[in-house]
Image: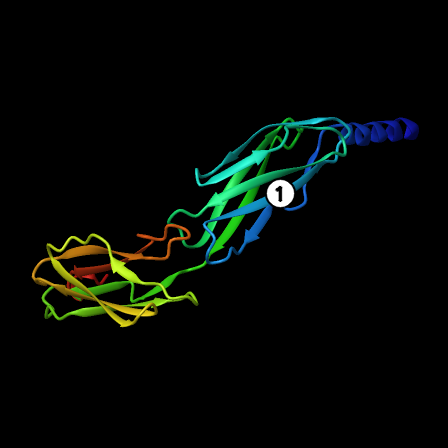
Amino acid sequence: MRLTLFVLLALTIWLGTARAQLVFAHTTLELYPAPQADSAKAVYTFHNAGAKPVHIAMVKSSCDCTVPSLAKQDFAPGEEGEVEVIFTFHKRSGTQEKYLQVISNAPGHPAIVLTLRVTIPMVLDLDPMFAEWRRGDPPAPHAIDVTILLPDPVHVTLGKVDRTHFACTLETLVPGRHDRITITPASTAVEATVAIPVETDYTPHAIAFAYTAHAGVLPPASATAP
C-alpha cells in the first residue's frame, strides 16, 4: 500500500514537471526615463522551466501606446526569451501604468499578466490647477502660477481658450522659468467653467496640451454643503 502511494506521488510530481512552464524573472518593471525621452523600453526576460516546448500565441497590450514584440514564439525546455515593450509617451506625464497579457499553451498558466510602470518627468507645475469663484462673488482676477521643473528653460504659451465667460492672459515673470496665468470672469452671476491648455516649446515628447489649467464659477458654498 505504501509502495502504491509512493508511486502515485512520484507520478504526480513527474506529470507536474513534464509540461511547459513559462517563468518570468520579473512580472512588474518600473522605469524612470530622462526628461528628454519621448519613449521608454522595457524588457521582460523569461525561460521555459518545464520539460515540454512552450508556444506563446500572442502578447496583448492594454493600450495602443504600449507595443510588445517577441523575437520568436516557440521555446524549448530550458530556453530563455524576452518580451520587449516600447511605451510611447505622446502627451502623457506623471506616473503611467500599463498592462500586458502573455498568452501561451502552458497548462495551468495560459495567461501571465505583466505590469509596466513608467514615471514620466513633469515639465511644469500649475499652482493652483483650478481657479474658482462662487456664484455672486466679485469678479476679481485670479492667478495660476506656472513653474518650470526642468533644469533647462522652457517657454510657455496658452492654447485655444473659450473666452465666452473668462478672459485669460499670460505674463512672463522669469523667462523660461516662471509664468503667471490671470483669469477674470466676465460675470459670476452664472455658473461656468473653462479649460486652459498650457503649451510649451519643450518638444521631446510632444508635451503641448499635456497640461491644462481650469477655472470656474461654482454654486454658492451653502448650495454645495451636504
* Residue that appears at 26% across and 59% down: 157
- Looking at the image, residue 131 lies above or below residue 54: below
**Can you say which quadrant of the picture contains the N terminus?**
top right
**Can you say which quadrant of the picture contains the C terminus?**
bottom left
Image coords of residue 137 (percent x, y): 11, 69
Image coords of residue 170 (percent x, y): 21, 65
10 Å crowding of disc 1: few (<14), some (14-19), many (20+): some
Total labels: the figure holds 1
Left or right: 184 in relation to 103 = left
* Residue that appears at 33% across and 67% down: 176
User: Residue 93 versus residue 60: which sits nearer the camera?
Assistant: 93
Left or right: 18 in relation to 138 = right
Of all residues, the one furthest to the bottom in this rendering is 173
Left or right: 25 in relation to 33 = right
* Residue that appears at 44% across and 39% down: 63
Q: Secondary structure at mark 1?
A: strand
Q: Which residue type carries mark 1?
A: Tyr
Quadrant housing residue 224: bottom left
Left or right: 203 in relation to 32 = left
Colour mode of the rendering: rainbow
- Looking at the image, residue 203 lies above or below residue 58: below
Quadrant housing residue 151: bottom left
Q: Which residue is mark 1?
A: 44
User: Residue 176 versus residue 28: which sits nearer the camera?
Assistant: 176
Image coords of residue 50 (percent x, y): 75, 32
Quadrant housing residue 163: bottom left
